[in-house]
Amino acid sequence: MAKSATFFQTLVGAGVLLIALGLAWGAVDISSASGYGGVGPNFLPWFMAAALLGCGVFIVWESLSGGFRSMELPVGQDRPYWPGFIWITAGMLINAVLINRIGFILSCTLCFVLAVRGLRGATEMRDKSLASWLKDAAIGAAISAPVFWMFTKFLAISLPGLTSSGWI
């Protein structure tokens, strides 16, 4: 395996370790008072921090002990598809900015549409027609609406809605 490949694998592992430490640092400030089902709100951040820490340690150990020896060579492009990364990142950031303004369903639908654009761009399925955009929006709404209703109506968890009625 090339020396630069192991360097980048170690760098990815170090990045995962940093994310785990950042998540654990943020979890320190979350209350541990038990909530629904006896699990406190800090359970999931601590669980994810521990899981990421384990993954980061494994990636660093594996890369320093010779790299991913049995990893198959990548197929397709030899370089990352950066426009796809930008589409997906924009979708997540726009979702975070707009979720309180336009509601959960619309912001998650928009996030889905932008993420699908990014993922399709990396493949040969680059359909830029209006019908494709509308189909992605319909699928995004079909996914986010039941999630919204399940959380707000059945689990009584408050999510930002577009109207005060709580149905959209």
Image (spheres, rainbow, N blue to C red):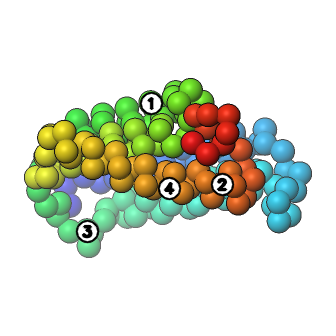
Answer with mark 2 or mark 4, whichever residue precedes in sequence. Answer: 4
Please say if the residues under marks 1 and 4 sit with CB atoms less than 8 Å apart.
no
Point out residue 166 in the picture as x, y percentages from the top left corner.
66, 42
Residue lying furthest right in this view? 33
**Disc number at residue 151?**
2
Indicate the amino acid at tag 1: Ile
- Which mark's residue is nearer the viewer, 2 or 3? 2
Tag 3 residue: 71
Label 1 packing within 10 angstroms: few (<14), some (14-19), many (20+): some
Gap in Å between the C-alphas at discs 3 and 4? 17 Å
Q: Is residue 154 above or below residue 20?
A: below
Q: Is residue 91 above or below residue 116?
A: above
Label 3 packing within 10 angstroms: few (<14), some (14-19), many (20+): few
- Which mark's residue is nearer the viewer, 2 or 4? 2
Determine if residue 52 is in view.
no
Position of the C terminus, as image quadrant, is top right
Indicate the amino acid at tag 4: Gly
| Number of numbered tags placed on the structure image | 4
Please say if the residues under marks 2 and 4 sit with CB atoms less than 8 Å apart.
no
Point out residue 75 in the picture as x, y percentages from the top left corner.
13, 61
Tag 4 residue: 56
Is residue 129 or residue 111 the one in the foreground? 129
Gap in Å between the C-alphas at discs 3 and 1? 35 Å
